[in-house]
Image (cartoon, rainbow, N blue to C red):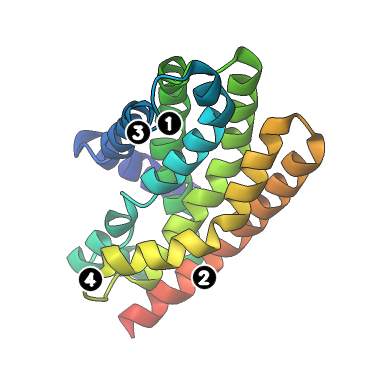
């Protein structure tokens, strides 16, 4: 348990010190700032579509850190050392998933408050966006980790990761945007998809890590 916690803290610290945790937030805010310029200053329109825009911006921001989740540790031999010390590949992947969510989701949830002001989002919609993202971001983090592990040793991994993540994240986007209408059905489906991704990602990422070391 101590090694598991140490790996989480190490990855979180590396994300913040290296500035990697801020890049998705900066991208997210840029999308929120640029969108009103594209559709015009119609406050009613911005309020109506703003929640969906924030979900799409979060999905795109989730692509930013994919290349640095697994590949640097594979290249430097850190994962080799952890495996030699008795950590399983799935446990390493689970620790990386927790660390990635801690580095990615809370800053995005805070940035949503600023973006909601820029889009003149109603208070009720803002609350629904925050609840939806709180439920959906673990699924996005799981997708990013699994794809990051699968593409860690491939050339052009960043572009390939985008092509893999975006189609797989469509259910999260649909149910997340659907939850903005106030119904609980979309939230339940969003939670189910997110839980499924979180449960499966460490196994997929662990298998990909083992395969890349063979």
- Distance from Cα at disc 3 to Cα at disc 1: 22 Å
Q: Check disc 2 and report the residue beneath it.
A: 204
Please indicate whether residue 167 sits to the left or right of residue 21 in the image. right
Mark 2 nearby-residue class (10 Å; few <14, some 14–19, many ≥20): many
Q: Quadrant of the C terminus?
A: bottom left
What residue lies at 46% left-to-right and 67% top-to-bottom?
Answer: 205
Residue 68 in the image: x percent, y percent?
27, 55
SS at mark 3?
A: helix
Mark 4 nearby-residue class (10 Å; few <14, some 14–19, many ≥20): few
Please report whichever mark, 1 or 2, sits nearer to the chain's N-terminal start.
1
Please report whichever mark, 2 or 3, sits nearer to the chain's N-terminal start.
3
- Distance from Cα at disc 2 to Cα at disc 3: 39 Å
**Is label 3 or label 4 in front?**
3
Q: Check disc 3 and report the residue beneath it.
A: 38
Please indicate whether residue 143 sits to the left or right of residue 62 in the image. right
**Is label 2 or label 3 in front?**
3
Residue 156, numbered label: 4
Q: Check disc 1 and report the residue beneath it.
A: 108
**Is label 3 or label 1 in front?**
3
Please report whichever mark, 3 or 4, sits nearer to the chain's N-terminal start.
3
Are the residues at dot 3 and dot 4 in contact (C-beta closer than 8 Å)? no
Please report whichever mark, 4 or 2, sits nearer to the chain's N-terminal start.
4
Residue 39: tell me if it is visible.
yes
């Amino acid at each position: 348990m101590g090694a598991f916690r140490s790996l989480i803290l190490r990855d979180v610290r590396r994300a913040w010190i290296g500035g990697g945790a801020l890049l998705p937030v900066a991208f997210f805010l840029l999308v929120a700032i640029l969108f009103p310029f594209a559709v015009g200053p119609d406050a009613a329109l911005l309020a109506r579509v703003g929640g969906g825009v924030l979900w799409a911006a979060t999905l795109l921001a989730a692509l930013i850190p994919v290349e640095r989740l697994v590949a640097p540790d594979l290249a430097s031999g850190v994962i080799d050392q952890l495996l030699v010390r008795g950590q399983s590949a799935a446990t390493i992947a689970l620790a990386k998933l927790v660390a990635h969510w801690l580095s990615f989701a809370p800053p995005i949830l805070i940035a949503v408050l600023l973006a909601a002001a820029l889009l003149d989002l109603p208070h009720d919609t803002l609350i629904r966006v925050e609840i939806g993202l709180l439920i959906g971001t673990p699924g996005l983090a799981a997708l990013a980790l699994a794809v990051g592990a699968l593409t860690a040793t491939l050339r052009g991994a960043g572009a390939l990761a985008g092509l893999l993540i975006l189609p797989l994240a469509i259910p999260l986007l649909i149910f997340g945007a659907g939850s903005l209408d106030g119904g609980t059905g979309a939230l339940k489906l969003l939670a189910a998809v997110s839980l499924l991704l979180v449960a499966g990602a460490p196994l997929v990422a662990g298998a990909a890590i083992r395969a890349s070391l063979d």
